[in-house]
Amino acid sequence: MTKIPAAKDPSRNVWLQLGFPDAEAHYLKAELVLRLDRAIKALRLTQREAARRLGATQPELSKILGGKFSEVSFERLMRFLAALGHSIEIKIGGSKPNRPGEVVIRDARRTAA
């Protein structure tokens, strides 16, 4: 059985179901926004406090967290997460011949020291 990356899986990516041409990008941004929302809640920050840390305005942050993030770049979302203490790692590796590569966002696994 072949595992389908979530961004390419129509059962997990609503933008694919709706036929958006950039469905994978929307899905990946949504994953980053979800983690941003979780980070803000974990730090018990108000949107105003979080926006100050991120260098954004509260209305802008509210729109992003409310799902209006199509105009926000991946870079900016990653900077937001980094400003809240998250590490972002981008790995580029070879793919299998005759197969497209994939982009995956996953949480880092924590190991006991």
Image (cartoon, helix red, strand yellow):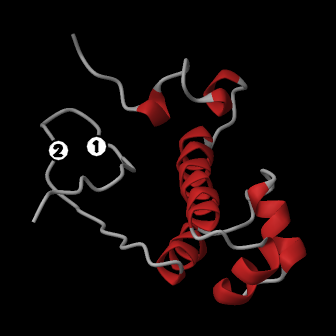
- Find numbered disc 2 in the image and state the secondary structure of the residue it sits on: loop
Q: Is residue 85 above or below residue 42?
A: below
Contact flag, marks 1 and 2 (Cβ < 8 Å): yes
* View extreme (right): residue: 59
**The one of 15 and 65 positioned closer to us in this rendering:** 65
Distance between mark 1 and mark 2 Cα atoms: 5 Å
Q: Is residue 105 above or below residue 74?
A: above
- Identified at 65% across, 68% down, the residue is 44
- Identified at 56% across, 63% down, the residue is 42
User: Which quadrant: the C terminus?
Assistant: bottom left
User: Which quadrant: the N terminus?
Assistant: top left
Q: Position of residue 25 (x, y in %)?
A: 56, 49
Q: Position of residue 43 (x, y in %)?
A: 58, 70
- Identified at 53% across, 83% down, the residue is 83
Q: Position of residue 99 (x, y in %)?
A: 23, 33
Occupied quadrant, residue 72 = bottom right
**The one of 26 and 46 positioned closer to us in this rendering:** 46
**The one of 109 and 28 positioned closer to us in this rendering:** 109
Q: Which mark is residue 95?
A: 2
Seen in the image, is 11 located left or right of residue 6?
A: right
Q: Which mark is residue 35?
A: none
- Find numbered disc 1 in the image and state the secondary structure of the residue it sits on: loop
Check disc 1 and give the amino acid type. Answer: Gly
Seen in the image, is 6 located left or right of residue 90?
A: right
- Identified at 29% across, 56% down, the residue is 108
Q: Position of residue 13 (x, y in %)?
A: 58, 29
Instruction: Provide the residue designation for mark 1.
Output: 101
Q: Is residue 40 above or below residue 18?
A: below
